[in-house]
């Protein structure tokens, strides 16, 4: 008869998610996960069949459920418009200017590190990008209806451009957390909406 678990899987996922977020997939060893979670390797493999990779994918999914909604904020609201899109970008800049914000977004980091070689991780990243694009498309459609942007604006195409811009912004912010540079990127992206 197997022994009962002596840990909470959600707590372990939170701790593993933080470690992957801080260090990345490749730089995080099973030993690092054992230290971060306090759970023995055998128990990790038992609770997460597939070991480190399975724990990583579950961590990405947890990040999508817990952290992403906080970052999207009002951008996910039905009444979101151009102000909420700008608020999202301004929040990214604020985060990137703080030392703890320089670790960036776990999903963007994963896109850079693993998505080209890991179909499961890429699927989670694609889901995030699609969610972000849906939010921005909806907000820009609202903005067109409210005449906050030009009537001819292609909301879907502009949303794609803004998604690419925010992903690039996070990469630039990790390497060059200069407020003037980051704000110039955002300001110029929004000029395209006028």
Image (cartoon, grey):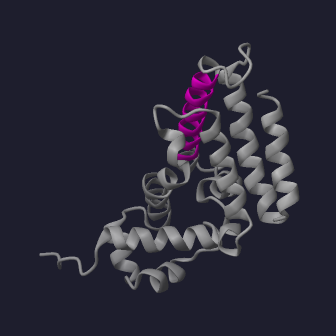
Q: Quadrant of the C terminus?
A: top right
Q: Nearer the viewer, residue 99 or 62?
A: 99
Identify whether 19 is placed above or below 167. below
Direction front: furthest residue: 147
119 is higher (above) or lower (below) than 94:
above
Q: Residue at x 81, y 65 (%)?
A: 177
* Residue displayed at 63% across by 27% down: 140
Write down the quadrant of residue 147 in the picture.
top right
Q: Main secondary structure of the magenta part?
A: helix
Residue 116 visible? The answer is: no
Q: Residue 116, percent across and down?
A: 68, 47
Quarter of image, res 4: bottom left
Q: Nearer the viewer, residue 90 or 96?
A: 90
| 179 displayed left or right of 149 | right
Residue at 71% x, 46% y is 166
Observer-nearest of 79 and 136: 79
Q: Is residue 56 left or right of residue 152?
A: left
Span colored in magenta: 123-143
Q: Is residue 149 a member of the stretch shown in magenta?
A: no
Q: Is residue 158 left or right of residue 83?
A: right
> What is the tally of numbered marks visible in this picture?
0
Residue 45 picture location, percent across and down: 38, 71
Residue 90, image x and y in percent? Answer: 69, 52
Asked whether residue 41 appears in the rendered view, the answer is yes
Residue 80 spot, x, y in % from top left: 54, 34
Quadrant position of the N terminus in the picture? bottom left
Q: Residue furthest left?
A: 1
Q: Is residue 44 above or below residue 39?
A: above
């Amino acid at each position: 008869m197997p022994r009962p678990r002596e840990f909470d899987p959600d707590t372990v996922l939170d701790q593993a998610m933080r470690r992957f977020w801080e260090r990345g997939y490749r730089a995080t060893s099973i030993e690092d996960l054992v230290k971060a979670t306090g759970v023995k390797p055998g128990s990790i493999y038992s609770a997460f069949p597939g070991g480190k990779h399975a724990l990583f994918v579950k961590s990405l999914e947890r990040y999508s459920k817990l952290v992403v909604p906080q970052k999207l904020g009002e951008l996910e609201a039905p009444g979101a418009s151009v102000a909420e899109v700008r608020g999202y970008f301004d929040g990214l800049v604020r985060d990137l200017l703080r030392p703890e914000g320089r670790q960036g977004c776990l999903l963007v980091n994963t896109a850079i590190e693993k998505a080209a070689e890991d179909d499961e991780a890429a699927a989670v990243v694609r889901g995030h990008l699609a969610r972000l694009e849906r939010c921005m498309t909806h907000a820009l459609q609202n903005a067109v209806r409210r005449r906050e942007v030009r009537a001819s604006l292609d909301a879907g195409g502009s949303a794609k451009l803004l998604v690419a811009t925010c992903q690039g912004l996070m990469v630039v912010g990790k390497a060059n957390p200069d407020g003037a540079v980051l704000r110039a990127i955002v300001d110029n992206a929004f000029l395209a909406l006028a």
